[in-house]
Amino acid sequence: MFAIILMGSIILENGQTVRATSTSVTLAALSETIQIGDIFSVSVTLKSSSSNKIGEVSAKVKYDTDGLEFFAENSVFEENNGEITITDAGTESSASKKYILQFKAVDTKTARIWIEGTPFIYNSNGKILSVSKNVLKVSVGERTEKSNNKDLSSLAIKEGELDKKFSKSQTDYTMTVPQEIKALTVLATPADAKSKVSVTGADKLLVGENKVVITVTSETKRTKDYNIVVTRGNIPSSTATPAATAIPGLNKGEQNSTDTQSLEDQKVEEEKQQENRFSEYEFVSVTNLRTIPKGYLSVPLAINERNVDAYQLEGQEKQEMFLVCAKYQGGEPGFYMYDKKEGTLQRFIKQQNTDVLITDTTMISVVEYNKEVRKLGLIIGICAGVITMLLISIIRMYMKSKGYTKELE
């Protein structure tokens, strides 16, 4: 009897340590590159392979103290001489649990982090789960400092000169270029070869003031802007010469050279006139007006090198006529028809109770209208007289054919 009771107690005691379905414990570094002095994180992930939930956890994590230093402690973690104890009372049961440990790299070597012995992980019913685990190896490299240098070592513009001598501490400059210069070639060299340089606003200059920004981005992603206010068109062209005239004493070759310069000057002047065209108009967004006429679709258009809202009738996209919105000398905004081929603007008038637009040139005056009405009335009277005479002739012929000649007489 005593032997049976003793055996039963041993079986019950062993029953408490029977391990249920296995659980994986995975160690993983959350940083791809680790250098001396870096503080990095390591995740300890517990995941049950079945529907059993993980409850109480007690595990010991060890690490190589000659390469790593444990960085933080809390109520769940306790560190002592290279051994971290994870104690979780399991107040909340779940299919997986994760703990984050923080370490500091103190030497260039391959350091290990592993689970010491067999951790005690229980399911929600209090049964111990069997465990699979891994060893994490972390490679610590030499410290490579990234550069914060975001300066330029030189800055120049191929098409002209800055208003002042370049200095890396001076970030604002101005310059003026001839009207025929429509883009700039920026020559900018970063002080650090690992820095990157980008330029905005230099590829398409408008007449007047333009802002060109040279941005330097350091290896640590810090940025610095060098600004150049570029005025296009207020100085004479470097190639411009007075208009050519016939000069006594010049031979034919010299005269032709002068004529060529005159043609170049004329071309520059035509470009200026083209760019100043419609300067008294301000092109506005169509949202400032009430509606867009039916049948008009939005299309891209640039006037004087400026993008404007433009519309074309559906199915007439190949024509060079565009509906635009503009204000003349600060007046009220309205619709205009822009002829791209001829380079002209013509005011449009919207008819009442219709979405058809007509131009000023298609409207006629009241006098002209009355003339047209009288002309039409005269034509109608003549037609009526002719028709009456025809009817009388037809009636006479009919009566003669019936023997009513005497009555007709």
Image (cartoon, rainbow, N blue to C red):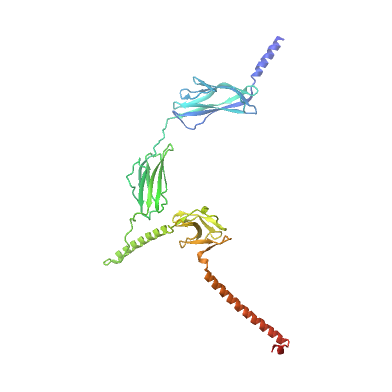
Instruction: From the viewer's perspective, tell me whether residue 231 is left or right of residue 12.
Output: left
Return the residue nearer the eye: 328 or 64: 328
Outermost residue on the top side: it is 2
Query: Can residue 157 be seen at all in this image of the molecule?
Result: no
Instruction: From the viewer's perspective, tell me whether residue 242 is left or right of residue 130.
Output: left
Q: Position of residue 152 (x, y in %)?
A: 37, 41
- All told, the count of numbered labels is 0
The relative height of residue 59 versus residue 274 in the rendered view (above or below) is: above
Q: Position of residue 213 (x, y in %)?
A: 41, 45
Q: Quadrant of residue 235?
A: bottom left
Query: Can residue 383 be seen at all in this image of the molecule?
Result: yes
Outermost residue on the right side: it is 402
Q: Quadrant of the C terminus?
A: bottom right
Q: Residue at x 33, y 61 (%)?
A: 261
Q: Quadrant of the N terminus?
A: top right
Q: Position of residue 121 (x, y in %)?
A: 60, 23
The relative height of residue 79 versus residue 276 in the rendered view (above or below) is: above
Q: Quadrant of residue 117?
A: top right
Q: Position of residue 160 (x, y in %)?
A: 34, 50
Instruction: From the viewer's perspective, tell me whether residue 206 is left or right of residue 351.
Output: left
Q: Residue at x 66, y 18 (%)?
A: 15
Q: Residue at x 64, y 82 (%)?
A: 389
Return the residue nearer the eye: 402 or 375: 375
The relative height of residue 144 versus residue 351 in the rendered view (above or below) is: above
